[in-house]
Image: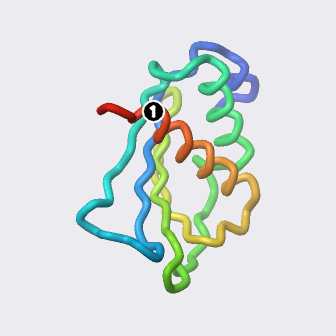
Amino acid sequence: MQTGKASDETVTGEARVRIEGGLAHFPGLAKEQTVSFHDLASPERRELATLADKADFFDCTPANETARPDARTYTVGLTIDGRSREIRVAEPIRDPAMAKLVSVVRRLSKQHSVGR
């Protein structure tokens, strides 16, 4: 993503998250939640783009860690301005920038997927 693009209101794309594992995990009920940037306010779109930049989401090498027993694994997918990537991260997420990105994607996808 180009520097400065996060402040542009024309950021387009979508965010996806799928959660697996955890203490009360039911594999058949695990669903991917998706939120389109069209459904988000400009500050939310900018926040996602900025967090993706800070976490180096599109260029990082994902940690090769296996989840602890009863921990969650997050599959996070982002498509921002034509760039697309999906990565899996396991709890505990050691990189603070990636942890914040996962948290925001979870929150926004949950808020905007109600009733769908």
Location of residue 89 with respect to 32 vertically, above or below = below
Look at the picture and state if 32 lies above or below 27: above
- Residue 109 in the image, given as x and y percentages of width and height: 47, 39
Q: What amino acid is found at the position of numbered circle 1 in the picture? A: Glu
Residue 67 position (above or below residue 84): below
Res. 113 image quadrant: top left
Left or right of 25, for residue 28:
left
| Residue under pointer 1 | 14
Q: Kindly identify the residue that appears in the image at 63 percent across and 57 percent down.
A: 60
Q: Position of residue 20 (x, y in %)?
A: 41, 67
The extreme bottom residue here reads: 69
Position in image of residue 29 (x %, y %): 27, 60
* Screen quadrant of the C terminus: top left
Rendered residue at 58%/18% (across/down): 41
Q: Nearer the viewer, residue 29 or 105?
A: 29
Q: Nearer the viewer, residue 23 or 109?
A: 23
The N terminus, quarter of image: top right
**Front position in the image: 106 or 12:** 106
Within 10 Å of disc 1 (Cα), the crowding (few <14, some 14-19, many 20+) is: many
Q: Is residue 87 above or below residue 77?
A: below
Q: Quadrant of residue 11?
A: top right
Q: Residue at x 49, y 61 (%)?
A: 74
Q: What element does badge 1 sit on? A: strand
Q: Residue at left 38%, top 44%?
A: 33
